[in-house]
Amino acid sequence: MKYVSTRAGSAGDAAPIGFLDAVLAGLAPDGGLYVPQIWPTLTTEEIAGFAGKPYAEVAADILSRFAGHEIPHDVLLEMCAEAYGTFTHAATCPIKQLRPGQFLLELFHGPSLAFKDVAMQLLGRLYDYALSRQGRVMTVVCATSGDTGGAAVEAFRGRANTRIVALFPEGRISEVQRRFMTTAADANVACLSVEGTFDDCQTLVKGLFGDDQFRRAVDLTGVNSINFARIVAQAVYYFTAAVALGAPKREVAFCVPTGNFGDAFAGWVAKQMGLPIGRIIVATNSNDIMARAFEDGRYARGVVAATQSPAMDIQIASNFERLYYETARRDGVETSRAFRAFTETGVLDLPPAALATMKELFSGASVTEDETARTILSTLNETGEVIDPHTAVAVAAANRATLPDGMPLVILSTAHPAKFPEAVQAATGAAPPRPASARRLDGKAERFDRLPADAETIKTYIRDFART
Ligand SMILES: *Cc1c(COP(=O)(O)O)cnc(C)c1O
């Protein structure tokens, strides 16, 4: 199985590469995103066969269709068993009924209590596998507004072939989020509290990748949500949830709290592979670029507003380029033109045919701050479930949806409420219960360095760290 860039065919495009190379590369050198040359498909018998299987086995099966012969099946199985062995729920990603026909898919039972663990735990092990065979050590950098940093540190700490540097904006992430990163005692972890905003952190990281000499010197790599392995790992729970609710005999709908569009795109992938998904509702907070795109056909950058669901405070949804490429009949030249223009102008008008194809599966819904808080409270009162603000955005969107009779709706629950105690407390008057993985951070020493938002200072720091 080879991977092509969404900008293939344009001037200076990237050549097709194998699965592990695509994983280590993250972004393609032509600025595009990697997608498989051909989407693998499953028969209805194969999908039905997932019923009752352990999560790790389904994950290994699906991953093997993308990794091809590059990773032996027993190795994949062991990797998945280890990755999902870190989850505290025996079902890994359990579903829980909320109301008639409405279900929560709990994706937050991993080590950092957010759904990013599902993909990141696997990614850490894929990196180890690929790099140990090449005798290579890479430096993972990630800028985080909260959840990604914790999940990345948990996934990469203590690994022999990677070191991880997490940059977060000083004073702008919650204490729980910070402690998930800074309490890791492993020597291959560096946490940087940057005197600036999240945008400053992202700009700094982009600058590191833009400096060829520096990039080679520390063998830099990124693990943000455009990494193709993260998408594949996220497609798995669409299968396990849908099969538990009657697929492939029955169509199932999903509602996804969305920021960078990686999670929602993973649903598109599952459908492409043969899973009967009737609808995907893309739920956003007031940062509604994706909801607007599906509504009026105009993908247009807005000003980022801070909300109670900070992991979705994004006004450029990087993974949307993948959906655009697919609905533009895989025309890499057109995709390259469209997204280069978008970078310049901040606006992309979707071709009517592409928009129509997107709308066959996707619809958008944006949810205000008030509605989010009210939904946390009403969900507690009506169902007894305490939900986090990201999940609440999706529950609010789901409550508005009209679906064909008998089609179950699965709402992706992306964070444990204990990760956002202030928002839950404000909405319900009570702090959410704290699971053991949050309590274990109490009293642990924190380790991080404070640095100015200055590219040269950060480079020097990382160079020194990479030498140790
Ligand atoms: C990252 C994140 C999201 C958004 O996922 P995307 O793949 O970026 O759309 C939603 N909820 C939580 C809690 C997250 O951490």
Image (tube, grey):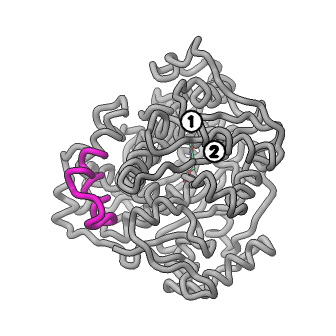
Q: Please give the range of residues in magenta.
A: 59-79
Q: How many marks?
A: 2
Residue 145 in view of the camera: no
Which of the two residues, 468 or 84, is positioned nearer the viewer here?
Answer: 468
Residue tagged 2 = 311
Eyeballing the image, is 24 above or below 443? below
Asked if disc 2 is less than 8 Å from ligand 1, the answer is yes
Which of the two residues, 32 or 175, is positioned nearer the viewer here?
Answer: 32
* Three-letter residue code for mark 1: Gly
Mark 1 crowdedness (10 Å alpha carbons): few <14, some 14-19, many ≥20: many
Disc 1 element: helix
In the rendered image, residue 52 lying in the magenta stretch gets the answer: no
Q: How far apart are marks 1 and 2 (CA)?
A: 12 Å
Task: Return the mark for residue 86.
Answer: none
In the rendered image, residue 68 lying in the magenta stretch gets the answer: yes
Mark 2 crowdedness (10 Å alpha carbons): few <14, some 14-19, many ≥20: many
- Residue beneath the point at 67% across and 25% down: 175
Task: Return the mark for residue 150.
Answer: 1
Eyeballing the image, is 291 above or below 140? below
* Residue 321 rendering spot, x and y as whole percentages: 59, 71
- Residue beneath the point at 54% across and 78% down: 14
Q: Which of marks 1 and 2 is in front?
A: 1
* Residue 344 rendering spot, x and y as whole percentages: 80, 74
- Residue beneath the point at 44% across and 38% down: 159
- Residue beneath the point at 58% across and 43% down: 148
